[in-house]
Amino acid sequence: MNKITATINSVHGVVVDAQYEGAQPSVGQLLSLQNKPDIRFMIVSLLPDDILVAINLSEVVLCAGEVLTGTGETLQLPVGKSVLGRVFNALGETLDSDEALKDVSYIPATNEQSREISASQKSDLIETGIKAIDFFAPFVHGRKIGIVGGAGVGKTVLTTELMHNVAKSKQGISYFVGIGERMREARELYDTLSSAKLLDSTVMYLAQMNENAALRFLVGGSAAATARYMRDTYKKDVLFFVDNVYRFLQAGNELSTLMGEVSSEGGYQPTLFTEVGTFQENLSSSSKGAITSVQSLFIPADDLTDPAVTEVFSQLDSVVVLSRAIMEEGRFPAVDLLNTNSALLTADIVGERHVALVRQVQSILQKYQSLKGIVAIIGETELSVADRRAYYQARDLMEFFRQSMFVTERNTGVKGQYFTRNETLKGVEKILKSEPQQ
């Protein structure tokens, strides 16, 4: 790779424009501040007249006129068995301790996809132990599930609970990628995994909300690159948890604004669709192993029609929607049972019994929604016998899907619960067959 020298023309936050001399560099190449090799930059685009655009990977303050030199390298990330149980930043540097990594190799952060990439041929159900998810949005090997909702409705708690329950029952590798969230939440997850003895099979990548947009934008790709390596080298299935995909897109938007790009309709970067597609493609399966991902997604202003939200939706197989109204009613997890859905809810995957029960429950819940307004005006006693039965059954079903979380035991003092899928189906059948509680 060509070594170059570049002089900074302008600085816009973490984005710098620089005039380079010599042979044309390549996108992805690393630069360093002259005489300060620890301060690194990554080239993200090349412009006419020998201008390069790079992002600052450190927190240093820069000025026009400073000189950058090419390193002849790209960003390299550690891989190998000794990365298990460790915490990294977007640059592959350890965050948990100063203990050096042993017996590791390094791969480029732009690690290419395997040529054998294909959709997972398995349709095995992965039991989560969470009734609302196993019933309405079954978790399937090698597929993608999204947990979406506004601020403060329990996305991180539910994602952490899924990681606790699913990782405990699988013989694979788990990744947790924290993008733009609070360090406190990452620390609580680390302690939860440690107490559950799950750290030895887990890798964590973090770029928290106090870090710059460049690190928040890169961390998901860095984690995905190493996950693909682990999948293909060790022939292991990977569980890939992301909290929060919207913060990744938000970081991309910040960088786009700093680079002077014109926003698309909705105020997002013009490359939004490409960035979502690339991110999801990086989490594909191959013949050597599968990557099964759980992605939490913040919904700005609780608007499900937001362009970023709808684009991510289109890439997911199952969507679990969390509702602020349900949370305010005190029902946890605050899953919107009607808007939660899955393209994997087919007889071939979950069986005829499961599909029939979901359709029946959705019908009752829809009936309940139409009756709520009537009941608020004239009361329950004025409903017909059939409507009253559906109304009470819906209330029993909503109560049934309440559940205590293992990861909140320390805060609430209430013991966590785990339900097998068969227990959930039997519980639903019992409600549908019995007389509802009035």
Image: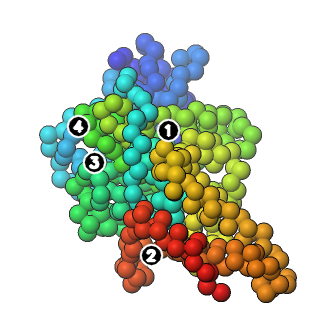
Q: Is residue 147 left or right of residue 302?
A: left
> What residue is pinned by disc 2?
404
Question: Residue 204 at what x, y percent from top left?
Answer: 33, 52
- Return the residue nearer the eye: 290 or 278: 290
> What residue is pinned by disc 1?
280
Q: Tell me which residue sits at (38%, 70%) in the image.
A: 418
Instruction: Find residue 395 and report its image quarter.
Output: bottom right
The quadrant the C terminus occupies is bottom right
The disc placed on residue 47 is none
Dot 2 and dot 3 residues touching (CB under 8 Å): no
Q: Tell me which residue sits at (30%, 67%) in the image.
A: 191
Q: Tell me which residue sits at (51%, 33%) in the image.
A: 278
Q: Amino acid at mark 3?
A: Gly
> What residue is pinned by disc 3?
172
Question: Residue 268 at what x, y percent from top left?
Answer: 67, 42
Mark closer to the chain start, 2 or 4: 4
Q: Amino acid at mark 1?
A: Gln
Q: Disc 2 versus disc 3: distance between alpha carbons? A: 26 Å
Q: Disc 4 versus disc 1: distance between alpha carbons? A: 22 Å
Mark closer to the chain start, 2 or 1: 1
Q: Classify mark 2: residues with Cα within 10 Å, few (<14), some (14-19) or many (20+).
A: some
Q: Disc 4 versus disc 3: distance between alpha carbons? A: 10 Å
Q: Amino acid at mark 4?
A: Tyr
Mark closer to the chain start, 4 or 1: 4
